[in-house]
């Protein structure tokens, strides 16, 4: 009998504490937040929040919090009941619309989520959080054009919104299904080669449900000789976080271009607006050259920072190159200034045919800048210049000056 009485008191004791008249709604609310955020004890947090609401029925913030905790506890019916009651009371708090729309978004009810967000934006048209969530809802439902509109509205309010900037850049590849482009590059050497180089590339890009595919044809006049190359690149999606880069190219004009080139990378869109890549590139002239690459990128307000390296091992040593890039976005995803500096030769550059002579093992320094801008969103222009100081033979250096122009039409 004593054991039963002790067990009953153990159950009733916390309830007695909850119902103490000297504990204010604010104190109960603080305890509920501690239980939810620090201890992840959602049942206790719910009980405390409900007790707080009894003491202060009009305390909207606690009710919104209760709906959130029900959502985290996966009691969706109870969460919707709380939010529906707040809706009937015509609550206009920004956090209410954000919490309610998040519930529907996380459970793939995109139409309902947009309906809630539109109502909330009617009261809070300058809310960055509501515009950002609306962009994510449209992005998840495949309405990329509407997602882009929402992100642009967000960036008009705060051009330095990091998450908005990151999303806009990624959406730029999805809002237009097709793109054609042309680039022209010119290289001048003061000592290394007597003739200037000319490079022209024509590309077609198609966005498919599984990722983008790019077909490109290249023409080059190097060493006073002509050559052509064909390239195919694909960016298949694996998950919302990961996607691949797969590339291949072929040329019958060895020396102007590699005979063939292949490459594969795993890319990741990481939390906190970071991104990363790891993979390889392979160039075949008369022999194979294998390069391993890794990069880390970060969006911060209007900026994008990236550091990339290429590592090339052989029997004697390991050659390496490093390139740092900074972009400053002025408006949309295609409007930005670029500054770049680094050492070594990258296989992504038009100079990659220099790798045939293994001059990539000699010292190379580079610095450059560029400007991209769009006209009516579908016309994209680019211009860039790069300066190289190249040790083309041991203890012999020369200078190279590159300038590149580009135009892309999206449709």
Image (spheres, rainbow, N blue to C red):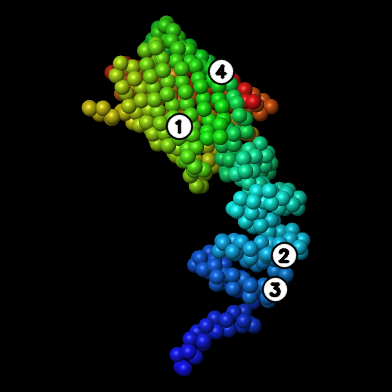
Q: Quadrant of residue 257?
A: top left
Label of residue 182 in the image: 4
Q: Earlier in the sequence, mark 2 or mark 4?
A: 2
Q: Is 378 rendered above or below residue 115?
A: above
Circle 2 is placed at which residue position?
85
Residue 196 in view of the camera? no
Q: Earlier in the sequence, mark 3 or mark 4?
A: 3
Q: Earlier in the sequence, mark 3 or mark 2?
A: 3
Residue 122 in view of the camera? yes
| Residue drawn at the location 59% of the way across and 36% of the way down | 171
| Residue drawn at the location 58% of the way across and 40% of the way down | 167
Q: Position of residue 377 (x, y in %)?
A: 66, 28
Please state which of residues 284 and 74 is positioned toward the viewer in this rendering.
74
Please state which of residues 217 and 306 is positioned toward the viewer in this rendering.
217
| Residue drawn at the location 55% of the way across and 70% of the way down | 43
| 154 sits left or right of 32 in the view | right
Q: Nearer the viewer, mark 3 or mark 2?
A: 2
Helix, strand or loop under label 1: strand
Circle 3 is placed at which residue position?
56
């Amino acid at each position: 009998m004593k054991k039963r009485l002790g067990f009953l008191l153990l159950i009733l004791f916390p309830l007695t504490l909850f119902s103490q008249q000297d504990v204010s709604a604010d104190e109960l609310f603080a305890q509920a937040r501690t239980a939810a955020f620090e201890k992840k004890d959602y049942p206790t947090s719910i009980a405390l929040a409900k007790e707080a609401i009894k003491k202060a029925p009009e305390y909207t913030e606690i009710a919104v919090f209760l709906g959130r905790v029900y959502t985290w506890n996966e009691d969706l019916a109870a969460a919707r009941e709380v939010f529906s009651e707040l809706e009937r009371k015509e609550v206009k708090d920004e956090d209410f619309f954000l919490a309610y729309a998040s519930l529907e978004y996380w459970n793939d009810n995109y139409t309902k989520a947009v309906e809630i967000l539109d109502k909330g934006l009617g009261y809070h048209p300058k809310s960055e959080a509501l515009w950002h969530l609306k962009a994510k809802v449209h992005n998840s439902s495949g309405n990329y054009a509407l997602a882009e509109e929402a992100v642009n509205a967000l960036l008009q309010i705060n051009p330095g919104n990091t998450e908005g900037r990151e999303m806009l850049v990624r959406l730029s590849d999805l809002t237009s299904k097709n793109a054609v482009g042309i680039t022209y590059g010119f290289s001048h050497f003061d000592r290394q080669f007597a003739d200037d180089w000319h490079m022209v590339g024509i590309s077609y890009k198609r966005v498919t449900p599984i990722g983008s595919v790019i077909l490109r044809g290249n023409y080059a006049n190097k060493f006073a000789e002509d050559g052509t190359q064909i390239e195919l690149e694909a960016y298949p999606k694996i998950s919302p976080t990961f996607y691949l880069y797969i590339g291949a190219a072929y040329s019958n004009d060895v020396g102007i271009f590699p005979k063939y080139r292949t490459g594969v990378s795993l890319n990741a869109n990481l939390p906190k607006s970071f991104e990363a890549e790891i993979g390889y590139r392979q160039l075949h002239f008369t022999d194979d050259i294998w390069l391993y690459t890794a990069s880390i990128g970060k969006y911060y307000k209007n900026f994008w920072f990236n550091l990339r390296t290429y590592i090339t091992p052989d029997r004697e040593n390991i050659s390496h190159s490093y390139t740092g890039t900074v972009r400053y976005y002025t408006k949309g995803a295609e409007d930005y200034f670029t500054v770049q500096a680094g050492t070594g030769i990258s296989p992504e550059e038009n100079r990659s045919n220099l790798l045939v002579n293994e001059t990539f093992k000699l010292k190379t320094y580079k610095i450059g800048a560029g400007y991209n801008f769009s006209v009516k969103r579908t016309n994209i222009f680019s211009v860039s210049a790069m300066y190289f100081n190249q040790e083309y033979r041991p203890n012999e250096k020369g200078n190279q000056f590159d300038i590149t122009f580009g135009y892309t039409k999206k449709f």
